[in-house]
Image: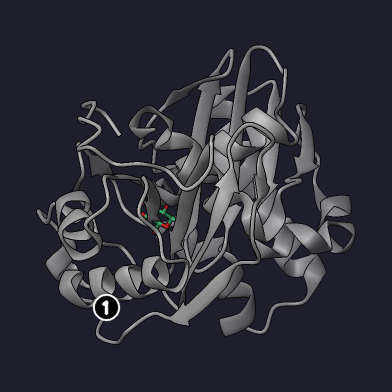
Amino acid sequence: MAKRQKKAGAKSSGPKTILGIDIGGTGIKGAPVDIERGVLAKPRFRIDTPQPATPQAVAGTVAAIAKHFKWKGPIGCTFPAVIKDGVAHSAANVDKSWIGTNGRELIQQATGCPTELVNDADAAGIAEVMFGAGKGVPGTVLLLTLGTGIGSALFLDGKLVPNTELGHVIFKGLDAEKYCAESTREREKLGWKKWGKRVNRYLCHVEFLIAPDLLIIGGGVSKKSDKYFKFFNTKCHVVPAKMLNEAGIIGGAAVAKHLL
Ligand code: BGC
């Protein structure tokens, strides 16, 4: 996010429609988004993430998605790393060659479209705060996405504090995401109770550090909240995300609003 970009003479295909693209470790998904209503304007299109997921290869895949939609307008793209002014500053679960790469510029070159690049959890949080579980909630709202890693998005009265990376808090001697991400549940074949209790311990720790008024749990596993929310005993209210699989695409698009 950060620095505002010029419109670069781009035209959008509709009045308030932006192509949102969510770059993940296994898939890259995109769809034009009606950013006023927070809904997909067309069915989403997905391509497997190229392996190795080098910046050039990923930018090529993003361009293929833009081409699929014959897209000529702004693009809002998410990426699972710290992103400052288009540049990736970390690479926990992605190809290390991303560190120091200006992904925004690469995607802009590959697609010919003005682009914004944002951390994936921040994008999901923006979607929840604008249209979902965090809409209209005052005070401190924290979204944690449980997936391959753990992402975080922190808001104060609806305003994002970008790049918080609370999934990398050291907890029980481990990077917290190694302790209780959804991928850990799968890898270690943990039952819902065991994993739910792990997540609860982590949430209680994060609650102690941040004291959120509302905690939103996102990521694919937020759909199955009935299986593990019962093991939570945080003081603050915890709710599942509402935007589910589309949060990244919608939030990514919303971040690029200034390019319209
Ligand atoms: C990354 C974050 C990302 C999260 C979820 C973490 O490993 O460091 O930037 O938001 O995974 O994808």
Side of 60 where 157 appears, left or right: right
- Nearest the viewer among 105 and 74 is 74
Judge whether residue 242 can be spotted in this image.
Answer: yes
- The residue lying furthest to the left in this view is 100
147 relative to 46, above or below: above
Q: Which residue is mark 1?
A: 53
Q: Quadrant of the C terminus?
A: top left
| Residue 6 image position (x, y, % from top left) | 20, 30
224 relative to 113, above or below: below
Task: Give the amino acid type for the residue marked by disc 1 in the picture.
Answer: Ala
- Dot 1 falls on a residue whose secondary structure is loop
Question: In the image, ligand 1 is in what quadrant?
Answer: bottom left
- Nearest the viewer among 198 and 224 is 224
Q: Quadrant of the N terminus?
A: top left
Side of 4 where 137 appears, left or right: right
Q: Residue at x 80, y 46 (%)?
A: 232
163 relative to 141, above or below: below
Q: Residue at x 69, y 20 (%)?
A: 213
| Residue 26 image position (x, y, % from top left) | 45, 79
Side of 54 where 207 appears, left or right: right
Q: Residue at x 70, y 29 (%)?
A: 134
| Residue 158 image position (x, y, % from top left) | 57, 18
- Nearest the viewer among 220 and 115 is 115
